[in-house]
Image (cartoon, grey):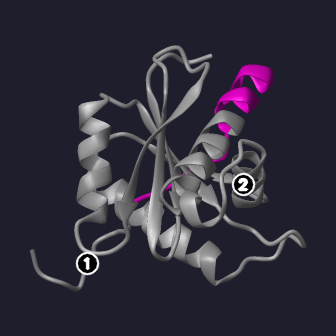
Amino acid sequence: MRSGVRLGVDVGTARIGVARSDPYGMLATPVETVKRGPGDLARIAELGIEWDVVEFVVGLPIALSGRETASTQDAREFARELASVQPAPVRMVDERLSTVSAQAALRASGRTSRNSRSVIDQVAAVIILQHALDFERSADSPPGAIVDPPRADPDEGP
C-alpha cells in the first residue's frame, strides 16, 4: 500500500463532495462540500495543497448496465480539468451506487433527505475513496485509471 493522503471527489451537478484519507491510506473521512461552479476546481486544488495529497480519486458514475451517461462525461471532463490545475495525479474509479449507499447510510443513522443534503456528497466521496483504498490494499495495485490533463491545441499560439 502506497503511503500518503488521497482526496476523494464525488462530482455532482450542483455540489462536489470531498473526502480525505489518513496518511497510511487506511480510512476515508469527510472534508467538505464544494458548490459546483466558478472556483470549484481552485477550491479542490487548494484542499489538495492543504492536505499535501499524493493523489486525487474522482468517482466515475457509470450506469448499472455499464453504459456511460451524461454524468459520466461530466465527471471525466471535471477530472481532466482538475488534472490540469494541480501537480498530483488524478485517478478515476467506478462509483456505481455510491450515492445510493450514502443515502442508505444516512437514513440508517436517523437523518432525513432534507437534513442530509449538505453532507450526502461528502458521504458519497468517503464511500468512493474508501472503496479505492480497500481495492489498493487487497489488489496491491492502484485503483482505477490515471487521467491525463487536456492537451493544448498546437494550432493555438502561446
Residue 90 in magenta?
Answer: no
Q: Which residues are magenta?
A: 132-149
Residue found at x 46% / y 17%: 23
**Three-letter amino acid code at disc 1?**
Pro
**Three-letter amino acid code at disc 2?**
Ser
Q: Which residue is mark 1?
A: 154
Residue found at x 24% / y 33%: 50
Residue 138 in magenta?
Answer: yes
Q: Which residue is mark 2?
A: 98
Quadrant assignment, res 138: top right
Name the side, left or right, on which 95 lies relative to 39.
right
* Disc 2/disc 1 C-alpha distance (Å): 39 Å
Name the side, left or right, on which 158 lies relative to 46.
left
Count residues near mark 2 (Cα–Cα under 10 Å), then give few for <14, some for 14-19, many for 20+.
many
The vertical placement of 138 against 128, above or below, is above
Q: Toward the viewer: 1 or 25?
A: 25
Secondary structure type for disc 2:
helix
